[in-house]
Amino acid sequence: MKKFSLYLKESNEILGNILIIVDVQEQFSKFMYKPTPEKYVNAIKNYAKNFKEVYQIWDGHNYVDGKIQKINNPSYNFGEKMNFRKVYGTSASEKVKKLGEQTLNYKPDTKEGDLFKVNDDFKLDEQGESYIVRIENNHKWFYINKELANFFKTLKGKNVVIVGGADGECLHDIEVAMKSFGINQTPNQKYIYSSKTTS
């Protein structure tokens, strides 16, 4: 009978030796009950040790008393090779919304996963190529800044495992964005939280 560690090694070889952690942050701790936020974070830290490459994508904003606050660093360190700040929800959001509306006017048959390069007129990024991708959830569009876009391009054709949250929301944004860049992904439901999780 094979040891569990051997099964895990073989599974990683099939699914990919790359782990992507999305939005595992203090401001979302009220949703991370598996069974408690602390145990959930520690479980991901231990899980990450099974991968050759670990990356973290984190939300660059938080709402406090109805106001948006910028966050400059991720809440946790998972031993990742690199981490990437996404800016949806910051001052870029209204510009992304406007750009999405203009895109729909230009191409009304746009469907989820359709990717569009952002032109310089919108000044959403300093320099380099950035994109928006159509999303079929409450966000409607997801902005992929130049750092995230360049990262996704390096993963084209590779297999990755994705964890974090929230399921159907920000995690879905990343899943659709990665697919649009040709990245093969497998979500591990054991380490995915939902914004509907309250206990």
Image (tube, rainbow, N blue to C red):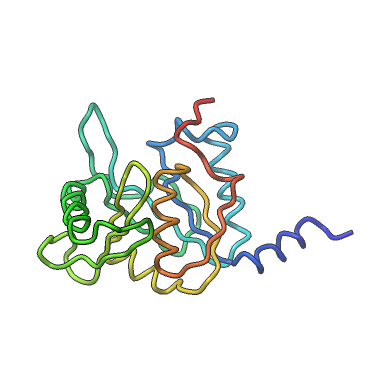
The residue shown at (37%, 44%) is: 137
Between 40 and 127, the residue placed more toward the observer is 127
- Decide: is 27 above or below 154: above
Q: Is residue 195 found left or right of 190 in the rendered image? A: left
Q: Is residue 85 found left or right of 199 in the rendered image? A: left
- Decide: is 64 above or below 144: above
Between 179 and 70, the residue placed more toward the observer is 179
Image coordinates of residue 100 in percent, x first then y, are 22, 54
Image coordinates of residue 156 in percent, x first then y, are 45, 73
Q: Is residue 47 found left or right of 83 in the rendered image? A: right
- Decide: is 150 above or below 8: below
Question: Furthest residue to the front?
Answer: 109
Asked which quadrant contains residue 36, the reply is top right
Between 178 and 4, the residue placed more toward the observer is 178
- Viewport quadrant of the N terminus: bottom right
Question: Furthest residue to the left?
Answer: 121
Asked which quadrant contains residue 63, the reply is top left
Asked which quadrant contains residue 178, the reply is bottom left
Question: Furthest residue to the right?
Answer: 1
The residue shown at (20%, 49%) is: 97
Image coordinates of residue 59 in percent, x first then y, are 34, 47
Total labels: the figure holds: 0
Image coordinates of residue 94 in percent, x first then y, are 17, 47
The residue shown at (32%, 59%) is: 133
The residue shown at (46%, 71%) is: 155
Q: Is residue 90 found left or right of 5 in the rendered image? A: left
- Viewport quadrant of the C terminus: top right
